[in-house]
Amino acid sequence: MRAYWADPSQANGDALRGLLTREATHWQYTHGVPDTSLVNPDNEAFDQALLDRPGNQEIQLALFLDYGVNPGHYPAWQDYLRTQQPPLLAVWGRNDEIFGPDGARAYARDVKQARIHLLDAGHFPLTTRLKQSAALIRDFLRGLSD
């Protein structure tokens, strides 16, 4: 991805097309999930059907390229978090290799009351730890009204 950000050439874009395959989508849903029977195959099938629409690979590549502007904004976002101290909940898959658990922990460095929950899940904890995730979200939202 970083190579594509630095040089959005056809070759670097083509190197990312593997992220849009059925195998990659399956990996995103199942990697890091202790019990893959919790993964509803309909979710990944629906995602893949959308990815496979004509012209969508080019849209996804444009989105990947646009992600490259985000790191330049991190200092401003981190400053906002440090100065404003907004309520913050991160319900994260501790086995997620796309957005690793250190990404969730980083919020706690800036927001003193951040609630960070690393669940035994992969990239989509809402799909495999729905009840646990929902309870954490519900408790967090109830706490906002106190």
Image (tube, rainbow, N blue to C red):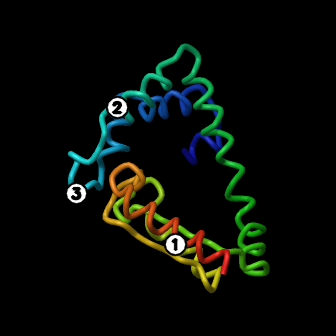
> Could you give the CA–CA distance between mark 2 and mark 1, rounded to whole angstroms?
29 Å
- Mark 2 crowdedness (10 Å alpha carbons): few <14, some 14-19, many ≥20: few
Of 73 and 32, which appears nearest the observer? 32
Which of the image's four quarters has the N terminus? Answer: top right
Disc 1: which residue: 139
Q: Secondary structure at mark 1?
A: helix
Q: Amino acid at mark 3?
A: Pro
Counting from the top left corner in percent of width and height, residue 109 is at 60, 82
Closer to the N terminus: mark 2 or mark 1? Answer: 2
Real-space Cα distance between discs 3 and 2? 19 Å
| Location of residue 67 with respect to 51 vertically, above or below | below
What amino acid is labelled 1 in the image? Asp
Q: Is residue 93 left or right of residue 38?
A: right
Q: Residue at x 59, y 16 (%)?
A: 55
- Taking depth in this image into account, of 43 and 144 the one nearest to the observer is 144
Lower position in the chain sequence, tag 1 or tag 3: 3
Please give left or right for residue 124 compared with residue 113 in the image: left
| Mark 3 lies on residue | 34
Identity, as a three-letter code, of the amino acid under mark 2:
Asp
SS for tag 3? loop
Q: Residue at x 59, y 72 (%)?
A: 142
Label annotation for residue 69: none
Q: Residue 133's image quarter?
A: bottom left
> In the rendered picture of this protein, how many numbered marks are placed on residues?
3
Given this view, does label 1 or label 3 mark the residue nearer the observer? 1
In the rendered structure, are the residues bearing label 3 and label 2 in contact, judged by CB atoms less than 8 Å apart? no
Residue annotated with mark 2:
42
On screen, residue 96 above or below 15: below
Would you call the spot at circle 3 few (<14 residues within 10 Å), some (14-19), or many (20 or more)?
few
For discs 3 and 2, the disc positioned in front in the rendered view:
2
